[in-house]
């Protein structure tokens, strides 16, 4: 996309392709272990909970809460023009945690951002093949 000027991730056909395929369709896909039934994020071929290689992909609800956050005052590349912006760890309803850029908050007023606030995933098209998930406060 000509107007998307941030780094674009590359899908790994063996590890992350289902995640990026889902994102392209507006779905948040997470790896889940079929042995211990736990989801995890970031995608990897082995379960970080029980070390099983039996991984399947499931569609997540796209709901979560802010675990913690930080306001970024400096950045490079395409992110520099968004300074200040807020990054956050999101506790997803399914039990995994994801690092993200938080949308819909006032990064110039960090006191207005509350840990525990409910968030919902949304996707931004980065290229014809990649859509990137972001999270937005819904309260």
Image (cartoon, rainbow, N blue to C red):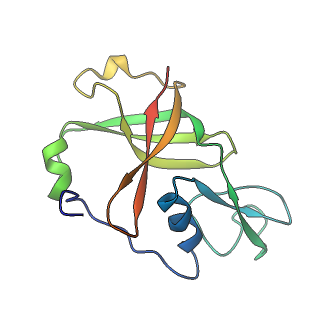
Identify which residue, 51 or 27, lies in the foreground: 27
Looking at the image, which residue is at 38% across and 38% down? 102
Q: Residue 66: percent from the left, percent from the top? A: 51, 32
Q: Which residue is drawn at the image coordinates 27% and 64% (left, top)? A: 7
Rendering quarter of residue 54: bottom right
Residue in view at x 65 percent, y 75 percent: 45
Q: Residue 51 appears at what percent x and percent y?
A: 76, 71
Q: In this view of the protein, which residue sits in the foreground, 59 or 86?
A: 59
As drawn, 128 above or below 110: below
Q: Nearer the viewer, residue 123 or 77?
A: 123
The residue shown at (50%, 58%) is 23
Answer left or right for 34 relative to 70.
Answer: right
Q: Kindly give the residue lying farthest to the bottom in the view shown.
A: 14
Point out the residue furthest to the right here. Answer: 35
Left or right of residue 112, residue 135 in this image: right
Query: Compared to 21, does 45 lie above or below?
Result: below
Q: How many marks?
A: 0
Q: Residue 107 is drawn in which quadrant?
A: top left
Q: Quick check: 138 above or below 71?
A: above
In the rendered structure, the answer to whether residue 60 lies left or right of residue 124 reads right
Q: Quadrant of the N terminus?
A: bottom left
Q: Is residue 71 above or below residue 97?
A: above
């Amino acid at each position: 996309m000509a107007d998307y000027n941030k780094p674009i991730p590359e899908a790994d056909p063996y590890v992350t392709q289902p995640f990026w395929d889902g994102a392209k369709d507006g779905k948040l896909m997470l790896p889940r272990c079929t042995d211990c039934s736990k989801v995890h994020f970031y995608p990897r071929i082995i379960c970080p909970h029980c070390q099983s290689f039996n991984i399947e992909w499931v569609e997540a609800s796209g709901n979560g809460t802010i675990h913690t956050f930080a306001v970024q005052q400096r950045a490079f590349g395409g992110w520099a023009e968004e300074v200040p912006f807020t990054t956050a760890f999101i506790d997803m309803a399914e039990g995994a945690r994801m690092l993200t850029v938080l949308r819909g908050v006032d990064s110039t007023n960090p006191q207005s951002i509350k840990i525990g606030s409910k968030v919902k995933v949304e996707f931004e098209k980065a290229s014809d093949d990649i859509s990137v998930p972001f999270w937005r406060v819904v309260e």
